[in-house]
Image: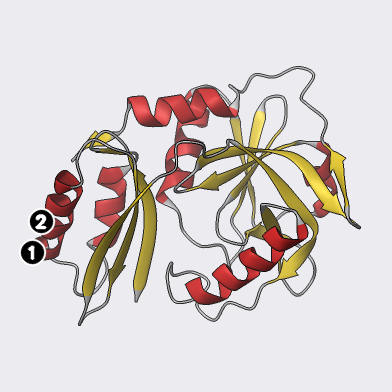
Amino acid sequence: MVTVEFALRGQRVAHLSALLDTLRTNEGFGPEREAALLARLRAAGPAAHRVILRSTPGTFTVETRPLPPAATDQVILDAAGTVDQRTHPTRPGPDRGWQSRQLAWVRGEGAGESVLLDKEGAVISAIAAPLLLLTEASVHVSTHPRATPSVMLDGVVAHLAELGLEVVAEPGGFPMSPLRRCEVWVLDPVAGIQLVTGWLEYGSIMGTRPLSHRAAPDHRTVETWRWETADAV
């Protein structure tokens, strides 16, 4: 099973071509399903929607829900972290129920997301989204074996590389300490790029340190680029 979520705005989808290329590699997602997906997206109209696509060899559904206009571009992360218990970490969809339950608990505690930890305590990603760590002139990407592939992550990293940032792979995931010292983005496929503005720790929110000098654009500039270059459906 594959389940993917993304935003539809003004009948445009960011990274749509890359998403379709990925879906075509999954069993059962052939030309008929691709045509049905695009038809459903066109029928949704110009408003903003959250799209949930589920595809298995025997089933195919596309659900569109209104996207609230007040989605925030900032997020608080739970610093204690959530130990990864996914059974199919490299495929989007099979572990969605577990991820949703963990997110609900974290949000009940006062954070918007949590770092996802492997057995050794390294940070793989957030529970349901990739993370990027930015320094003054580089962008660090988790290539942990349990990281879920993301067309949004690939597109954003390629764009930052084109702008001159050094891309640094982190094959073991992120240590916690540099995440606390540097700028961190959560790449939410529905809400977009969110800046981590605080860490929930022992019931209190600890602030973050802004970059004093930067070669990288800020998260809002990159999010604007995503939609300026988004594919029409």
Which is more toward the observer, 173 or 186?
186
Tell me which amino acid carries mark 2. Answer: Ala
> In which quadrant is the C terminus drawn?
top left
- The image shows a total of numbered marks equal to 2
- The residue depicted at 55 percent of the width and 22 percent of the height is 164
Tell me which amino acid carries mark 1. Answer: Glu
- Residue 228 image point, x, y percent: 34, 24
Colouring used for the render:
secondary structure
Residue 220, above or below 188: above
Query: Tag 2: Cα neighbours inside 10 Å, few (<14), some, or many (≥20)?
Result: few
Which is more toward the observer, 95 or 97?
97
- Residue 172 image point, x, y percent: 69, 60
Residue 172, above or below 96: above
- The residue depicted at 28 percent of the width and 61 percent of the height is 63
Q: In the shown orientation, is residue 57 left or right of residue 146? A: left
- Residue 80 image point, x, y percent: 82, 61
- The residue depicted at 51 percent of the width and 62 percent of the height is 148
Q: Which residue position is annotated with label 2?
A: 35
Can residue 197 be seen here?
A: yes
Circle 2: element type: helix
Can residue 172 be seen here?
A: no
Q: Which residue position is annotated with label 1?
A: 32
State yes or no: discs 1 and 2 in contact (Cβ < 8 Å): yes
Q: Quadrant of residue 3?
A: bottom left
Circle 1: element type: helix
Residue 83, above or below 190: below
Residue 68, above or below 40: above
Query: Tag 1: Cα neighbours inside 10 Å, few (<14), some, or many (≥20)?
Result: few
- The residue depicted at 75 percent of the width and 54 percent of the height is 110
Instruction: Measure the alpha-carbon separation of dots 1 and 2.
Output: 5 Å
